Amino acid sequence: MGVIHETAATLRFHGDELDPHEVTRLMGASPTRGEYKGALTVGRGRKAARTGGWALTVEYRQPGDLSGQIEEALSGLTQDLDVWRDLSGRFNGCFFVGFFMVDGNEGYNLSAETLKLLADRGLALLLDIYSGRHEDERAGYPLTVLSSPWDGGYFRLRRDGPGRLVVEAGNAYFHGEAECDISWMDSPAGLFAEMASAWRGWDGTKRWSDHEDRLRLSAKTDGLGHVLLDVDLLGADHASRLHVPLILDVEDLEDIAARMRKAVPIDF
C-alpha cells in the first residue's frame, strides 16, 4: 500500500447561532473564512450565508500528511480543552479532510496521538476520498457535463481544488470559461439536488451563484417536462459576461444531481 498522494484539511465550526468573532476570540486566531447566518458575503455578488461558519484551512501536503496538518492547525489555537468542548457542544465542529489518490491502492495511518487531539476537543473527522484516475484525468477532479438535447448547449464543471471550480459553457455558436471560488457550506450541487426533489415543477426561479458572482445559475420549469437553466459566466476582467441557456428534461434531473454531487460534493 502506497502513501496517500495528497491531503487537504480544514478545521471548521458551523451553526445557525454561530458568531465568528466569538469563535475567533475563544480560539485565539483568525479564520480563513468566517460568516454569520444571513450575512451578505463579500464579493461582486450579494448572497446570504445559509448558516454561521468559522473555518481555518492549512496548506495542502504532498505526500499526504494529515497528522501534521491537524497538529499545525491546532498548535496556533487555544489549548484550553474546556473552550473546545464548549464550542463543539454548541456547534458542529470537525476537521474536513480531502484524500487525493493517484494510484488505486493508497492509504494513510492516522496516529493515536492525533486521534486523541480530536477526541479531547470533541471534533469529528470527515473524509472526502478521491480515487486514483487514469493518466489523462489526473490533471483535475471529476468532470460533470450537462448537455441540452434541444439546442446543443453544454455546461462543464470540474473542481480544481477543494473550493475552486473551472466552468465552461457554450453551444454551437460560442463558448467561454471561468474560474470561481465556492464556500464549503454552499455547493452548486445543492441547487441540482433541490431541482431533482421537485421534479414535478416549482414556482418562480431557483438561483445559485458563487461568492464572487463569477458563475450564476438560475432554473425554472416550463410546465411541459423541461427545466430552463440559464448559465452566466463572468470573465477574468470582471466585465465580460457570457450567457448560455440550456433546456433539460426533468426525467434527467436525478442523474444530473448525482453527477453534480460527485464532481462538487454538497458538503466538501
Image (tube, helix red, strand yellow):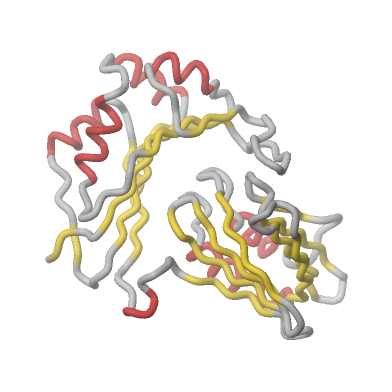
> Where does the image place residue 204, in percent across and percent down from the top left?
86, 55
Q: In the orientation shown, which residue stands out farthest toward the front? A: 237
Note whether residue 15 is visible.
no
* Pick the front one: 22 or 115: 22
**In this rendering, is residue 32 above or below 207?**
above
> Where does the image place residue 73, in percent across and percent down from the top left?
30, 32
> Where does the image place residue 162, in percent across and percent down from the top left?
44, 52
**In this rendering, is residue 147 above or below 52?**
below
> Where does the image place residue 267, in percent across and percent down from the top left?
49, 49
* Pick the front one: 185 or 257: 185
Q: Is residue 13 left or right of residue 105?
A: right
| Residue shown at 37% from the left, 55% from the top | 128
**In this rendering, is residue 224 above or below 130?**
below
| Residue shown at 16% from the left, 59% from the top | 3
Q: Is residue 95 left or right of residue 242?
A: left
| Residue shown at 63% from the left, 44% from the top | 211
Q: Is residue 96 left or right of residue 249?
A: left
Q: Is residue 128 left or right of residue 156?
A: left
Task: Identify the image quadrant of residue 190.
Answer: bottom right
Task: Identify the image quadrant of residue 28.
Answer: top left
In this rendering, the count of numbered labels is: 0
* Pick the front one: 168 or 51: 168
Note whether residue 180 is visible.
yes
Q: On the rendered image, what quadrant is the N terminus found in?
A: bottom left
| Residue shown at 23% from the left, 71% from the top | 103
